Image (spheres, rainbow, N blue to C red):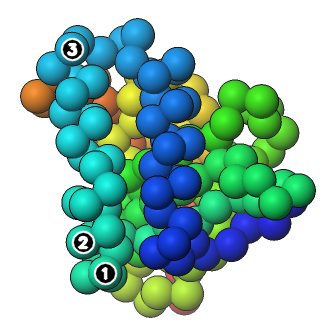
Amino acid sequence: MEIIKLNKNHIENALDLVWTVFLEFEAPDYSPQGIEEFKKFISIDSMIKQFEKEEITFWGCIINNVLTGVIATRGSNHICLLFVNKDYHRQGIGKRLFHTVLEECKRNSNCNNITVNSSPYAVEVYHRLGFVNLDQEQTVNGLRFTPMSYSIFRGMSRK
């Protein structure tokens, strides 16, 4: 299992994985409007533009030359995508991807927390990683999410 920073050439493959996993695990919890909104959010053109402007960073988990999981962040501390191929669930891939983002965030002296707008399906996953709810579930443009946060300094003394 290797975690790598993805480059522009990896993005289409990463988004294919995201869409496949979304359709199976997330879409059943969304309205047709929410599904369409998510599809627009992950459009290749939009993601490439954001990647080129360094507004979004992608990390991937590679096992036997296969992309098995993806995490993407806006800035250094907002997770906007975290998806793992169903054949690799419960193998620690999501946790490893999250810890990669956590380490990157710790290197940034202005980063005190990591945020995510979790889908209903992933709330418990984020809780197990140490995230706490910031508010109740919300729906915007058909997308259901719970705003959550992870404190970088949780369990550490600040100096």
Element type where label 2 sits in the image:
helix
Q: Position of residue 54 (x, y in %)?
A: 32, 81
Mark 1 nearby-residue class (10 Å; few <14, some 14–19, many ≥20): few
Image position of 157 (left or right of 96): left
The residue nearer to you, when weighing 15 against 153, is 15
Badge 3 amino acid: Pro
Q: Position of residue 11 (x, y in %)?
A: 47, 62
Image position of 38 (left or right of 66): left
Pointer 3 or 1: first along the chain: 3
Q: Tell me the residue that label 2 is attached to.
A: 49
Q: Tell me the residue that label 1 is attached to.
A: 52
- For the residues labelled 3 and 1, the Cα–Cα distance comes to 30 Å
Q: Are marks 1 and 2 in contact (CB under 8 Å)?
A: yes
Could you say which quadrant of the image residue 26 lies in? top left
- Can residue 123 be seen in this snapshot? no
Badge 2 amino acid: Lys
Q: Does 39 sit above or below residue 28?
A: below
Q: Residue at x 70, y 54 (%)?
A: 67
Residue 32, disc: 3
- For the residues labelled 1 and 2, the Cα–Cα distance comes to 5 Å
Badge 1 amino acid: Glu
Element type where label 3 sits in the image:
helix
Quarter the C terminus occupies: bottom right
Q: Are marks 2 and 3 in contact (CB under 8 Å)?
A: no
Q: Position of residue 132 (x, y in %)?
A: 46, 40
Q: Residue at x 77, y 53 (%)?
A: 66
